[in-house]
Image (spheres, helix red, strand yellow):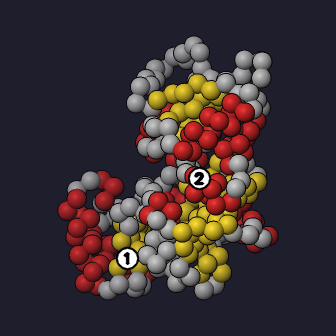
């Protein structure tokens, strides 16, 4: 590619996913500016030497969001844009948006105090799941089976003191097979899907779940694309469960890992991402 087009890759560390993106960009003749999120500063004036598009791959939601805001301020298209990162990066806001769009999602109640949290759990019913509004890899999630365990977990979260622990995001425990589904959406295309299976109720690949390629039938494709569109679209991983009443969407991830998915399905996910980002930068 000889027209001077440059892709900015904004990272915390270069994980296997970012290595794959760099290799995919090289294979397509796309020069890449590697941007370390710990070294960047952002003034109000537009600096020189900006890339034509920014692919935001920071592992920190906060850094990713504010970098996206800054680059958008400078007029640089960002994958994913700040409004998508802000919405999809907040599980509570995502739940409300999915509900607004008529997308099946677990029954959810939000509480703003420990006292209200107990009522929220009772409204959802046992067992229930308490989640942080922001986070990944199944961290800081808790399954509560009765009032006694609910009281202990709410008390523990309250004692932590951090603002993110003062909001209680409660969802029903969906009775599903020992697996869930991750569907990777790039733009208006579902590029790959896999099952994640585990004897633990949390089926994250980062927690050691086993994976297998999943067929993408019309229902799964349509639901994943609707969920991705609901948060603004882009490069997104949609997580679904097979509940008693059918598929439900429980999360949409705006800066998703894809090492396990690529290895499981053999799909060149990094290539899809690079081609999409270049397309966004050339609009």
Task: Using residue 12 as the reference point, say whether residue 267 is left or right of it.
Answer: right
Q: Secondary structure at mark 2?
A: loop
Residue in the picture at 41% in, 79% down: 128
Q: Which residue is pictured at 56% across the width and 82% down the height?
A: 177
Image position of 3 (left or right of 67): right
Q: Which residue is rendered at x = 57% and y = 57% of the image? A: 260
Quadrant (top left/top right/bottom left/bottom right) for the N terminus: top right
Q: Residues within 10 Å of mark 2 (few under 14, many from 20)?
A: many
Q: Nearer the viewer, residue 109 or 233?
A: 233
Give the tally of numbered discs: 2
Mark 1 — residue?
A: 143
Relative image position of residue 187 (x, y in whole percent): 73, 48
Please indicate, yes or no, whether residue 37 appears anywhere in the rendered image: yes
Q: Position of residue 175 (x, y in %)?
A: 52, 84
Up the image or down, 66 lies above or below 181; here it is above
Where residue 144 appears, as percent x and y from the top left, is 35, 79
Q: CA distance from mark 2 to mark 1?
A: 26 Å
Front residue of this view, candidates 159 and 242: 242
Can residue 101 be seen at all in this image of the molecule?
Answer: no
- Quarter of the image for the C terminus: give it: top right
Would you say the residues marked 2 and 1 are in contact, meaning their CB atoms lie under 8 Å apart? Answer: no
From what the image shows, is residue 117 above or below residue 42? Answer: below
Q: Which label's residue is closer to the chain start, 2 or 1?
A: 1
Q: Nearer the viewer, mark 2 or mark 1?
A: 2
Question: Any mark on residue 258, and which?
Answer: 2
Query: What's the residue at 48%, 55% (across, down)?
Result: 90
* Picture coordinates of residue 232, whole percent (x, y): 65, 50
């Amino acid at each position: 590619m000889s027209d001077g087009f440059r892709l900015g890759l904004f990272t915390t560390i270069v994980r296997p996913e970012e290595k794959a993106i760099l290799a995919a960009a090289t294979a397509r003749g796309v020069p890449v500016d590697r941007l370390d999120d710990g070294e960047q500063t952002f003034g109000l004036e537009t600096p020189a030497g900006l890339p034509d598009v920014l692919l935001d791959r920071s592992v920190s939601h906060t850094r990713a969001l504010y970098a996206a805001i800054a680059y958008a301020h400078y007029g640089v298209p960002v994958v994913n844009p700040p409004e998508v990162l802000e919405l999809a990066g907040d599980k509570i806001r995502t739940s409300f948006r999915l509900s607004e769009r008529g997308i099946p999602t677990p029954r959810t109640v939000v509480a703003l105090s420990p006292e209200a949290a107990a009522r929220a759990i009772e409204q959802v019913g046992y067992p229930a799941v308490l989640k942080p509004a922001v986070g990944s890899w199944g961290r800081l999630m808790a399954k509560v089976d009765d009032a006694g365990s609910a009281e202990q977990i709410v008390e523990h979260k309250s004692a932590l003191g951090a603002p993110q622990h003062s909001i209680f995001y409660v969802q029903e425990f969906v009775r599903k097979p020992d697996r869930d589904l991750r569907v990777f959406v790039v733009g208006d295309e579902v590029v790959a899907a896999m099952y994640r299976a585990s004897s633990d109720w949390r089926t994250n690949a980062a927690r050691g779940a086993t994976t297998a390629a999943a067929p993408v039938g019309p229902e799964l494709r349509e639901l994943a694309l609707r969920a991705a569109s609901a948060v603004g679209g882009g490069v997104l991983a949609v997580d679904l469960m097979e509940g008693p009443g059918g598929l439900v969407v429980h999360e949409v991830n705006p800066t998703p890992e894809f090492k396990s998915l690529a290895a499981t399905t053999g799909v060149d996910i990094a290539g899809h991402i690079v081609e999409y980002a270049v397309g966004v930068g050339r609009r």
